[in-house]
């Protein structure tokens, strides 16, 4: 089984290093989601790159995604359920809240360009990518997810706590773990929690 870790917006593959360090498997991949999209940065382009990357894989995939990575993991599983053995969704949404995206983009526009230097994307590309996610809604397709799902959310991640609880209700095969004291970026705040879930699946 191959473990695939998908980072969030504002992160890079490096943000999984503490999780990877604590994993019992060496078959781990952390794709850089923004590295091969060229000038056409969008959610659908990143998903297409991911589909191409794993189109010929024969071993079962164990996908763990955070935030944007969780959306991609969920979408990929809906489209290619036969390839996915298990799913971990961290700080996840299944229906992107438009108001939240618009507010996030407003904040991005107010931030200086240099604030984005370590995020893997420029300011304009971050706004573009975020805007391309406004209409995502997987509600009617969740019944295509048949593998076991672990939903993880930080206690302080108020923007995603409600969605995580609702997603747990909508997926009968899901379990929900709320991490005390953690915020949105659990791969940084509590990497041992994610590693423990991945190691015990």
Image: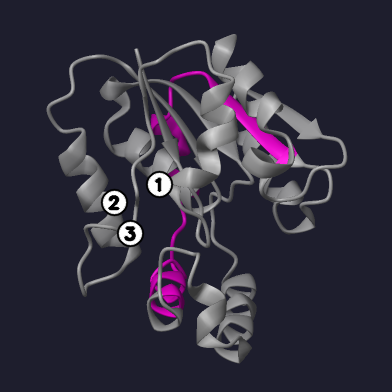
Query: Are the residues tagged 2 and 3 within 8 Å (C-beta)?
Result: no
Looking at the image, which residue is at 15% across and 33% down?
55
Q: Residues within 10 Å of mark 3 (few under 14, many from 20)?
A: many
Query: Residue 72 at x, y = what percent?
Result: 40, 47
Looking at the image, which residue is at 22% across and 42% down?
51
Rounded to the nearest angstrom, the CA distance separating label 1 from label 2 is 6 Å
Q: Nearer the viewer, mark 1 or mark 3?
A: 3
Query: Residue 90 at x, y = what percent?
Result: 61, 40
State the residue position of label 1: 72
Is residue 23 on the magenta stretch? no
**Which disc, if any, is residue 34?**
3
Rounded to the nearest angstrom, the CA distance separating label 1 from label 3 is 13 Å
**Which disc, if any, is residue 47?**
2
Magenta span of residues: 126-153
Which circle's residue, 1 or 3, is located before the other in the chain? 3
Horizontally, residue 200 falls left or right of residue 77, namely: right
């Amino acid at each position: 089984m191959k473990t695939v870790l998908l980072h969030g917006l504002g992160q890079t593959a490096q943000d999984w290093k503490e999780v990877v360090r604590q994993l019992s498997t060496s078959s781990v991949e952390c794709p850089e989601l923004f590295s091969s999209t060229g000038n056409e940065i969008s959610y659908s382009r990143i998903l297409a790159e991911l589909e191409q990357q794993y189109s010929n894989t024969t071993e079962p995939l164990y996908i763990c995604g955070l935030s944007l990575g969780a959306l991609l993991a969920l979408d990929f599983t809906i489209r290619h359920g036969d390839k996915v053995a298990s799913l971990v969704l961290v700080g996840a949404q299944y229906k992107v809240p438009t108001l939240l995206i618009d507010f996030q983009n407003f904040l991005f526009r107010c931030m200086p360009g240099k604030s984005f230097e370590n995020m893997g994307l420029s300011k304009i590309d971050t706004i573009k990518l975020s805007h391309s996610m406004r209409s995502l809604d997987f509600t009617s397709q969740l019944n295509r997810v048949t593998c076991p799902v672990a939903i993880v959310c930080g206690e302080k991640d108020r923007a995603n706590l409600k969605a995580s609880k609702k997603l747990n209700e909508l997926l009968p095969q899901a379990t929900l773990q709320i991490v005390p004291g953690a915020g949105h970026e659990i791969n940084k705040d509590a990497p041992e929690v994610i590693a423990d879930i991945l190691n015990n699946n």
